Amino acid sequence: MKIIGLILLAIGVIGIVLTVLLPEALGYAGLIAGATAILTGIVFVAATTCRVGTYDRRNHNGCC
């Protein structure tokens, strides 16, 4: 999931840059799509990071 999140971040940044450089090609909806891709990528990366941290804490706390 972390790889998917990083890919979404890259696609979002590329989409926003292309929309700013070529607004007649994509229209301004590219800004919304790019922002959505970036936010989704952040959520995927954060979910993966939090899950690994919780997993380590649960297994190394001295219980069974």
Image: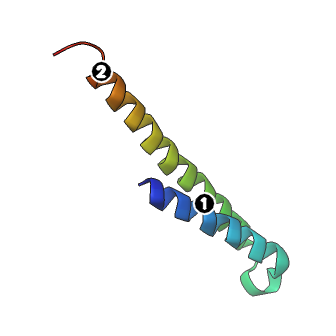
Instruction: Name which residue lies at 60% across and 52% down.
Output: 39
Residue 42 on image: x %, y %: 57, 49
Q: What residue does disc 1 label?
A: 9
Mark 2 is surrounded, within 10 Å at the Cα level, by few (under 14), some (14 to 19) or many (20 or more) other residues, namely few
Residue 33 on image: x %, y %: 64, 67
Instruction: Name which residue lies at 46% across and 40% down.
Output: 49
Q: What residue type is disc 2 on?
A: His
Q: Which residue ends up furthest to the right in the rendered image?
A: 21
Quadrant of the frame with the C terminus: top left
Residue 57 on image: x %, y %: 35, 23
Task: Tell which tag, 2 or 1, sits nearer the viewer.
Answer: 2
Query: Is 34 situated above or below 24?
Result: above
Residue 1 on image: x %, y %: 41, 55
Query: Is 58 situated above or below 6?
Result: above
Instruction: Name which residue lies at 30% across and 21% down.
Output: 60
Instruction: Name which residue lies at 51% across and 56% down.
Output: 5
**Separation (CA) of disc 2 from disc 1:** 32 Å
Q: What is the secondary structure assignment of the residue under circle 1? A: helix
Q: What residue type is disc 1 on?
A: Leu
Query: How is colour applied across the structure in the image?
Result: rainbow
Q: What residue does disc 2 label?
A: 60
